[in-house]
C-alpha cells in the first residue's frame, strides 16, 4: 500500500509556502516514536492515516503563519506614503497623452479603510510579538485537542517528562508537544528556509525547546484559550408554511483545544467515512 505518510524519506527541499504540504514532516514511523515517548496509544477506533493528516496539516499551518512577513507601523506608513504619491500621480496623468487605467472608487474606498484599521490592530498587539508565539497561540491548543481526540486524555498543563513516573497521564500533553517540536525542529534544521522567497532576517520559523520554565506557563495559557464555535445539529423543526425541514445550529464559546478536539474526533474515527484502516494496512 503506497502512502506518503507511511514512507520513509529524507526531504531536503527548503521550507517555503510552496514546499509546505508536499511531504509530511511526521510520517508513520515518527508518529510511533512520538507516541512511545509520550507514553500513550491511540484509541483502537482511530484512523491513524487521518490522525497523521490532521497533525501534519496543523504543523504546516503553523509554519505558514510563522513565515508571514510581520507588518509594523513603519511599513504601514511606507504603504500610506506610496499610496498617496500613486493616487496624486495618476490623477495628474488623467489628461495626459496616454492616461493610466482609472482606479475604481471601490478599490480606493477599501484601501482607505485598510489604512485606518491596520494601525488599530497593531496597537492591540503586544510589543515585538515574536512569531514563536504562534506555537502557544495556535499550535499548542490544536495539538492538545488532537491528542484528546486520538486518546481520550484530557490535556493538563502539568510538565512531567518521564512517562514512567506516577501520574504520567497528567503530563501527556506536555510530552506530546515536546516530541512533535523535536521532530519539526529536526526538519527545519535539515531543510532550512528558502531564501529565494524569504528575507531570513525577518521570518521567525522557531520551534524552540519547550523543556524550560516558560513552557508550563505557555501550555497553561494555551489550554485556557477560548474560541467561538458553531455546531450544526440534526434538523428537527419543520417550516409550517413550506413543510421544509429547518436546519438547527448552536453557537457558543469553549476551550479552543476542546472545540477543535471534538472536530478532529469526528474526522479520525476509523469507520466514520466507511474507510477501514488497520495496522496491517501500514505494513502491506
Image: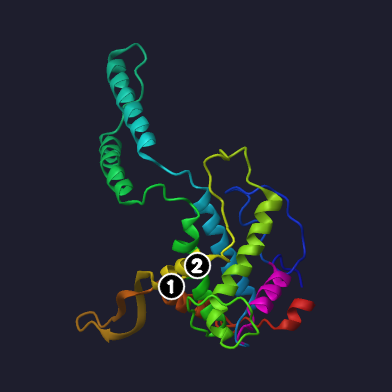
The image shows residue 226, relative to residue 205, as above or below, that is below
- Around disc 2, counting alpha carbons within 10 Å, would you say few (fewer than 14), some (14 to 19), or many (20 or more)? many
Is residue 149 visible from the viewing direction of this image?
no
Q: Report the span colored magenta.
A: 27-43
Q: Depth check: 106 or 246 in front?
A: 106
User: Residue 83's quadrant in the figure?
Assistant: top left
Q: Which residue is mark 1?
A: 223
Q: Residue 78: x, y in percent?
A: 37, 30
Q: Which residue sits furthest right? A: 284
Callout 1 secondary element: helix
Q: Is residue 172 magenta?
A: no
Q: Would you say the residues marked 1 and 2 are in contact, meaning their CB atoms lie under 8 Å apart?
A: yes
Q: Is residue 31 magenta?
A: yes
User: Residue 8's quadrant in the figure?
Assistant: bottom right
Q: Main secondary structure of the magenta part?
A: helix
Report the side of 131 relative to 77 (left or right).
right
Q: Residue at x 63, y 83 (%)?
A: 40
Callout 2 secondary element: helix
User: Residue 185's quadrant in the figure?
Assistant: bottom right
The image shows residue 89, relative to residue 112, as above or below, that is above
Q: Residue at x 46, y 57 (%)?
A: 133
Circle nearer the N terminus (1, 2) = 2
The image shows residue 150, relative to residue 13, as above or below, that is below
Q: Residue at x 36, y 70 (%)?
A: 226
Report the side of 179 relative to 142 (left or right).
right
Amino acid at each position: 500500500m503506497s502512502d506518503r505518510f507511511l514512507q520513509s524519506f529524507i526531504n531536503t527541499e527548503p521550507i517555503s509556502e510552496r514546499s509546505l504540504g508536499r511531504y509530511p514532516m511526521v510520517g508513520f514511523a515518527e508518529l510511533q516514536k512520538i507516541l512511545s515517548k509520550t507514553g500513550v496509544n491511540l484509541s483502537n477506533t482511530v484512523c491513524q492515516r487521518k490522525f497523521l493528516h490532521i497533525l501534519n496539516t496543523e504543523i504546516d499551518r503553523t509554519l505558514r503563519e510563522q513565515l508571514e512577513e510581520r507588518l509594523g507601523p513603519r511599513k504601514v506608513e511606507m504603504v500610506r506614503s506610496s499610496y498617496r504619491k500613486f493616487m496624486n500621480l495618476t490623477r495628474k496623468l488623467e489628461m495626459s497623452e496616454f492616461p493610466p487605467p482609472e482606479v475604481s472608487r471601490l478599490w480606493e474606498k477599501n484601501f482607505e479603510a485598510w489604512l485606518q484599521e491596520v494601525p488599530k490592530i497593531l496597537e492591540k498587539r503586544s510589543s515585538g510579538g515574536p512569531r514563536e508565539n504562534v506555537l502557544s497561540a495556535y499550535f499548542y491548543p490544536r495539538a492538545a485537542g488532537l491528542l484528546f481526540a486520538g486518546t481520550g486524555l484530557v490535556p493538563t498543563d502539568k510538565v512531567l517528562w518521564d512517562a514512567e513516573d506516577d501520574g504520567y497521564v497528567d503530563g501527556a500533553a506536555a510530552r506530546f508537544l515536546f516530541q512533535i517540536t523535536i521532530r519539526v525542529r529536526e526538519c527545519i534544521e535539515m531543510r532550512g528556509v528558502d531564501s529565494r522567497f524569504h528575507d531570513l532576517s525577518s521570518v521567525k520559523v522557531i520551534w524552540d525547546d519547550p523543556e524550560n520554565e516558560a513552557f508550563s506557563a505557555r501550555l497553561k495559557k494555551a489550554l485556557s484559550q477560548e474560541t467561538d464555535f458553531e455546531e450544526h445539529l440534526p434538523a428537527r423543526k419543520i417550516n409550517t408554511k413550506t413543510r421544509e425541514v429547518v436546519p438547527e445550529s448552536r453557537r457558543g464559546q469553549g476551550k479552543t483545544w476542546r472545540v477543535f478536539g471534538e472536530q478532529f474526533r469526528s474526522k479520525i474515527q476509523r469507520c466514520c467515512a466507511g474507510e477501514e484502516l488497520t495496522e496491517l494496512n501500514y505494513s502491506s
